[in-house]
Image (tube, rainbow, N blue to C red):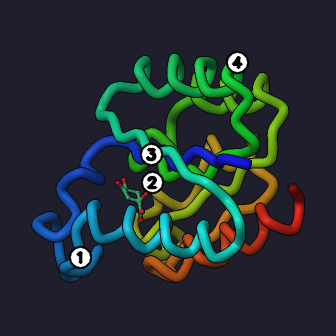
Amino acid sequence: KTIAILHGPNLDRLGKREPEVYGHATLADLEDFIRVGARQRGLGTTFFQSASEGALVDKIHALTDEGIAGFIVNFGAYSHTSIALRDALSAAELPAVEVHLSDIKAREPFRHHSMTAGACRAMISGKGFGGYAEALDQITQWL
Ligand code: DQA
């Protein structure tokens, strides 16, 4: 079984972007971490990053049609605003976990609510890369 890991805007800047919030590791480091963790749990992975809300919506539909088993998503700032991404995930009717590297509840009030988490079975926030390991554990249990 293969799961899709979707990254939203600015996550391609990991390592350079506000390292005091997000750390010094890059998106490539994160994807390696997830790929290895998934393989240990018997799962394949496919990755997609975009700054475009529409591209992320289209990708969710395409992956669903291709038979993807589930999603781990971090839509970045779109998490807080995007009804379109929430609807796309709901329509997929597949297990999904939302991850945030930082603790969104401990940051500015506009980050406290996630719009897209409503379409996910779990939301993990503030655990850095470890949040992705937890998400893999969750999704492995469900599949
Ligand atoms: C983030 C938190 C969001 O509020 C922010 O817009 C991001 C990253 C996180 O992983 O902590 O881009 O999703």
- Assign ligand 1 to one image quadrant: bottom left
Residue 7, horizontal then vertical, whole percent: 42, 47
Q: Earlier in the sequence, mark 4 or mark 2?
A: 4
Q: Whole-Å distance between the Cαs marked 1 and 2? A: 25 Å
Which dot, 4 or 1, sits closer to the camera? 4
Dots 3, 4 in contact, CB < 8 A: no
Task: Give the amino acid type for the residue marked by disc 4 in the picture.
Answer: Asp
Q: Secondary structure at mark 2?
A: helix
Residue 21, horizontal then vertical, whole percent: 27, 77
Q: Residues within 10 Å of mark 1 (few under 14, many from 20)?
A: some
Q: Secondary structure at mark 1?
A: loop
Query: Which residue is nearer to you in this view: 18 or 131?
Result: 131
Residue identifier under label 2: 110
Q: Quadrant of residue 118?
A: top right
Residue identifier under label 4: 65
Q: Residues within 10 Å of mark 4 (few under 14, many from 20)?
A: few
Q: Residues within 10 Å of mark 2 (few under 14, many from 20)?
A: few
Q: Is residue 136 above or below residue 46?
A: below
Q: Secondary structure at mark 4?
A: helix
Quadrant occupied by the C terminus: bottom right
Q: Whole-Å distance between the Cαs marked 3 and 2? A: 27 Å
Residue identifier under label 3: 47
Residue identifier under label 1: 25
Disc 4 within 8 angstroms of ligand 1 (CB): no
Q: Whole-Å distance between the Cαs marked 3 and 4? A: 16 Å
